[in-house]
Image (tube, helix red, strand yellow):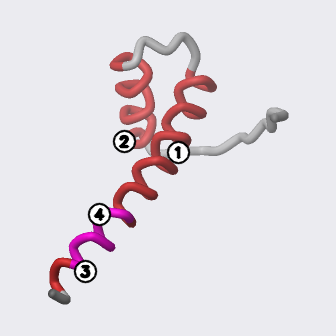
Amino acid sequence: MGRSRISVTVSEEAKEVLVGYQMDHRIKTRDDAMESLLRDYGKLSQRVKELEAQLAEKGSK
């Protein structure tokens, strides 16, 4: 898989979230932290969909 460069401007709040994530996960660079954070977001989004489907299934019984 290749790598793509993106450049964004974020609020101080968003920067604090990224830096906190970087520190919590002991990631050396902000680029690597952002990549990891985005991957986690994808995984967590999928998990939320799975849990919502389970709740909907239980609610219909």
- Whichever of callouts 3 and 1 sits on the residue coming sooner in the sequence is 1
Q: Nearer the viewer, mark 3 or mark 2?
A: 3
Where, by quadrant of the figure, is residue 4 drawn?
top right
- Whichever of callouts 3 and 2 sits on the residue coming sooner in the sequence is 2
The residue located at (47%, 47%) in the rendering is: 43
| Cα separation between marks 3 and 2 | 34 Å
| Cα separation between marks 2 and 1 | 8 Å
56 over 36 or under it: above or below: below
Q: Which residue is mark 1?
A: 10
Residue toward you, 53 or 25: 53
Q: Nearer the viewer, mark 4 or mark 1?
A: 4
- Mark 2 is surrounded, within 10 Å at the Cα level, by few (under 14), some (14 to 19) or many (20 or more) other residues, namely few
* Amino acid on which disc 4 is placed: Leu
**Mark drawn on residue 13:** 2
- Mark 4 is surrounded, within 10 Å at the Cα level, by few (under 14), some (14 to 19) or many (20 or more) other residues, namely few
The residue located at (25%, 79%) in the rendering is: 57
Under circle 2, the secondary element is helix
Q: Which residue is mark 4?
A: 51
Left or right: where does residue 30 sit relative to residue 47?
right
- Mark 1 is surrounded, within 10 Å at the Cα level, by few (under 14), some (14 to 19) or many (20 or more) other residues, namely few
Q: Nearer the viewer, mark 4 or mark 2?
A: 4
**Mark drawn on residue 56:** 3
Total numbered labels placed on residues in the image: 4
- Predominant secondary structure, magenta span: helix
Q: Magenta includes 28?
A: no
Left or right: where does residue 33 sit relative to residue 20?
right
| Cα separation between marks 4 and 2 | 29 Å
| Cα separation between marks 4 and 1 | 30 Å
Question: Please, which residue is most extreme toward the right here?
Answer: 2
Residue toward you, 47 or 35: 47
